[in-house]
Amino acid sequence: MVLQIKPDIFSVHFDMILAGPAVPAQLTEGAANLLLPGHTLPLKIDVNTGTAAGSQDHLLRWNLDDRLEGPMPSDQPLRLDAADGFTVTLPIPGAEKALNALRNCQDEVASIQGIEAGAYREQTRPPVPANNPGYWATDADYPPTARRERMEGIVGFRMTVAPDGSVSDCQITSSSGFDMLDKRTCLLLKQRAQFKPALGANGQPTVSYYSNRVRWAIP
């Protein structure tokens, strides 16, 4: 059984994935209880199911905000109680050290991109896409010249999300190698991407950031 903890770069949220042959192929999605090492009360979470990439193993995925703060004793296991009577008790020695390293990595990436750690650590909710990201850039948006000249690549981007949920800025964080595709990406994102804005410590909408990638591949 493998537990993966993946942080969002510009928020205090973590994706957690549990995968392995012991995960049932058919499991009801929805409410579950998660008891973390060092905690006395379980957290209420929503679990989604799937299949691990490049494997036949099934997986469970859920999201946590930074309730992972605090001591996580190495001698105490994580316990997940999901639907259909499925229960997992999993030792996770070294988890606290690993989480601290993840947070330091988050702060370092933010600093490189000119963002103060406090700008996202005070969020109580990250920005959430309000429309389907799959429609932000589609095959129909391929620049004719780029298609004709067989330009392909992956564009990494970071959007600044305003308190009203609109995109106020878009920057390329990793180039496709083709200026035409890079510029096309940000143009489309600023026109189409819509968000439920992030919420600050006071519960009010605040400026935030959203990062992802667009793959340009000629169909």
Image: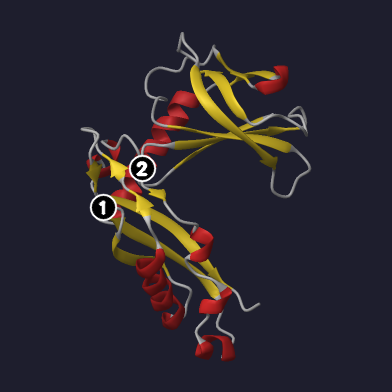
* Secondary structure of residue under mark 2: loop
Q: Quadrant of residue 200?
A: top left
Q: Is residue 35 left or right of residue 12?
A: right
Residue furthest top as drawn: 40
What residue is shown with label 1?
A: 164
Q: Quadrant of residue 150?
A: bottom right
What residue is shown with label 2?
A: 126
Please identify the quadrant where the C terminus is shown: bottom right
Question: What percent of the width, then of the height, locates residue 45?
Answer: 52, 26
* Secondary structure of residue under mark 1: loop
**Which residue is rendered at x = 48% and y = 62% of the image?**
213
**Which residue is rendered at x = 46% and y = 8% of the image?**
40
Question: What percent of the width, then of the height, locates residue 137?
Answer: 49, 69
Q: Quadrant of residue 46?
A: top right
Q: Is residue 122 left or right of residue 74?
A: left
Please identify the quadrant where the N terminus is shown: top right
